[in-house]
Image (cartoon, rainbow, N blue to C red):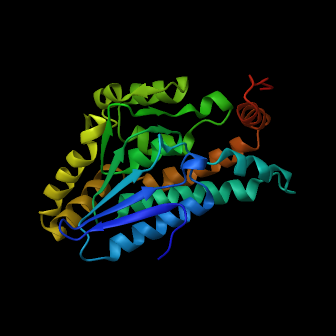
């Protein structure tokens, strides 16, 4: 399958499938097209019996900057002020995250850049995550009037309550060492050795029984996150409603115009 916004590499020697976000001009944002391509690539890897491990990586200095705010904001001109589109995008994104969670193969995030909002959600949804020392992480929706409600779902299931709330309430960037300390990622490597180390870990996992990994992964999430689907349905609706509030409109416009927002609520 031909992709426009991602690249794929299959290492037959190690049974590793690398999905690479490659929309650098848009900071690898989760646009509708990007979500569709990632979903398709995950399906391909899931159904390929030769693939035992999936790696999710990126090109450029930004791993993923979350949703495409320009696309979202442009939909406010619709008769429903964009409600149907907002709901579609947030539900599509939630299904993508669930597809990572429910994929038969382990999915490893290899982060060598900034990951914010739904980009941080993407990393939190992966089974494992490894970072270069230059990577940074944030859930900054609160800064633009759009609380990171859907990113909150895997984030709150990955790190502790107070650490998650600090990220969600302040919107501040944290560095790789703090991300490691709070459990958002598994380890930190120097930039020039990140890929080598991550592929070594993937190779180690790929040497295990695929069926055992499949059974174990499914069992892990069934016992740990029994209400995950309900949480995603709820938070997709919350984010849709949030997008209809005046402050999210103002906050996003201020962000796009590079000015301070004038809050109404």
Q: Is residue 212 above or below residue 121?
A: below
Q: In this image, 143 relative to 13: left or right?
A: right
At a point 43% along the width and 38% down the height, the residue shown is 113
At a point 13% along the width and 56% down the height, the residue shown is 204
Horizontal and vertical percent position of residue 127? 30, 51
Q: Nearer the viewer, residue 21 or 250?
A: 21
Q: In this image, 263 relative to 105: left or right?
A: right
At a point 61% along the width and 35% down the height, the residue shown is 147
Quadrant housing the C terminus: top right
- Please give the count of numbered marks on the rendered protein: 0
Q: Nearer the viewer, residue 8 or 161?
A: 8
Horizontal and vertical percent position of residue 209? 13, 67
Horizontal and vertical percent position of residue 20? 42, 57
Quadrant of residue 194 within the rendered picture: top left
Q: Nearer the viewer, residue 168 or 177?
A: 177
Horizontal and vertical percent position of residue 214? 23, 66
Quadrant of residue 35 within the rendered picture: bottom right
At a point 56% along the width and 55% down the height, the residue shown is 233
Q: In this image, 147 relative to 153: left or right?
A: right
Q: Is residue 225 above or below residue 32?
A: above
The residue furthest front is 192
Q: Nearer the viewer, residue 203 or 13?
A: 13
């Amino acid at each position: 399958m031909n992709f426009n916004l991602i690249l794929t590499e299959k290492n037959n020697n190690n049974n590793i499938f690398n999905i690479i976000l490659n929309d650098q001009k848009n900071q690898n944002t989760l646009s509708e097209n990007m979500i569709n391509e990632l979903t398709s690539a995950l399906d391909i890897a899931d159904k390929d019996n030769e693939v035992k491990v999936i790696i999710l990586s990126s090109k450029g200095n930004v791993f993923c900057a979350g949703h495409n705010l320009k696309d979202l904001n442009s939909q406010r001109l619709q008769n429903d002020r964009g409600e149907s589109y907002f709901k579609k995008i947030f539900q599509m994104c939630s299904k993508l995250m669930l597809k990572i969670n429910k994929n038969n193969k382990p999915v490893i995030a290899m982060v060598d850049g900034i990951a914010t909002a739904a980009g941080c959600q993407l990393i939190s949804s992966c089974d494992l995550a490894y970072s270069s020392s230059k990577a940074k992480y944030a859930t900054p929706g609160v800064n633009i009037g759009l609380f990171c409600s859907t990113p909150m779902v895997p984030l709150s299931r990955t790190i502790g309550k107070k650490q998650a709330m600090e990220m969600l309430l302040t919107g501040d960037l944290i560095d790789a060492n703090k991300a490691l300390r709070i459990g958002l990622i598994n380890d930190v490597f120097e930039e020039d050795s990140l890929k080598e180390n991550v592929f070594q870990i993937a190779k180690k996992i790929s040497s295990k029984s695929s069926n055992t990994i499949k059974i174990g992964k499914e069992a892990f999430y069934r016992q740990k996150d029994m209400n995950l689907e309900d949480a995603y349905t709820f938070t997709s609706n919350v984010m849709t409603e949030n997008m209809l509030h005046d402050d999210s409109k103002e906050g996003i416009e201020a962000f796009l115009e590079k000015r301070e927002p004038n809050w109404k609520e």
